[in-house]
Each structure stands twice: as C-alpha cells, then as structure tokens.
C-alpha cells in the first residue's frame, strides 16, 4: 500500500481564504472596470484562486499579480 501525498493545492479553501480572494477580486474588477458577472470576471477569479493556492496570500501582491494597480 502506498502513501498518497496530498498537494496543498488540492485542499479546499477555508472561509477566511475565500474572503481574501473575494476582496481582491472585487478590488481588481473595480480598478479595471470589469463587470463582475462576466466572462472576464470569471477568468480573473480563477487566476486569483490559483495564485492563492500557489502561496500568494498577501492581498496587495495578489491584486498586483492579478492585474490590479498600485495603491
């Protein structure tokens, strides 16, 4: 029997994690004038979650990497 190694990227995000991603998503959508119910917003959300799962947990860094502006 082999031990299965779990990747942290496979773990579900906790509520606090989702809150961070949501705040970043809302901020970037506002900055870039993206309709939150559109395809661009969906892609942006997927990018933010992927970055978060890769270890980028700082909201400012997430915002910049997702295409947001300084500030």
Image: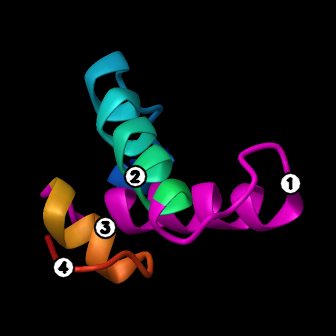
* Range drawn in magenta: 31-58
Q: Which residue is mark 1?
A: 38
- Residue that sits furthest to the right in the current view: 39
For residue 11, which quarter of the picture?
top left
Distance from disc 4 to disc 2, alpha carbons, whole Å, reads: 11 Å
Apparent side of residue 10 relative to residue 6 in the rendered image (left or right): right
Distance from disc 3 to disc 4, alpha carbons, whole Å, reads: 8 Å
Look at the numbered disc 4 and give the secondary structure of its residue: loop
* Earlier-in-chain disc, 1 versus 4: 1
Q: Which residue is mark 2?
A: 27
Q: Which residue is mark 3?
A: 63
* Magenta highlight on residue 50: yes
Seen in the picture, residue 46 relative to 12 is either above or below; the reply is below
Instruction: Determine crowd level at label 4: few under 14, some 14-19, many 20+ residues with C-alpha closer than 10 A.
Output: few
* Earlier-in-chain disc, 2 versus 1: 2
Q: Which residue is mark 4?
A: 70
Marks 2 and 3: CB-CB under 8 Å?
yes
- Image location (x, y in percent) of residue 6: 39, 49
* Earlier-in-chain disc, 3 versus 1: 1
Residue displayed at 60% across by 55% down: 45
Marks 1 and 4: CB-CB under 8 Å?
no
């Amino acid at each position: 029997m082999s031990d299965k190694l779990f990747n942290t990227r496979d773990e579900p995000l906790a509520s606090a994690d989702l809150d961070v991603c949501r705040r970043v998503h809302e901020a970037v959508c506002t900055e870039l004038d993206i309709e939150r119910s559109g395809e661009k917003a969906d892609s942006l959300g997927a990018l933010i979650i992927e970055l978060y799962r890769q270890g980028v947990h700082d909201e400012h860094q997430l915002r910049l990497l997702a295409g947001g502006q300084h500030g």
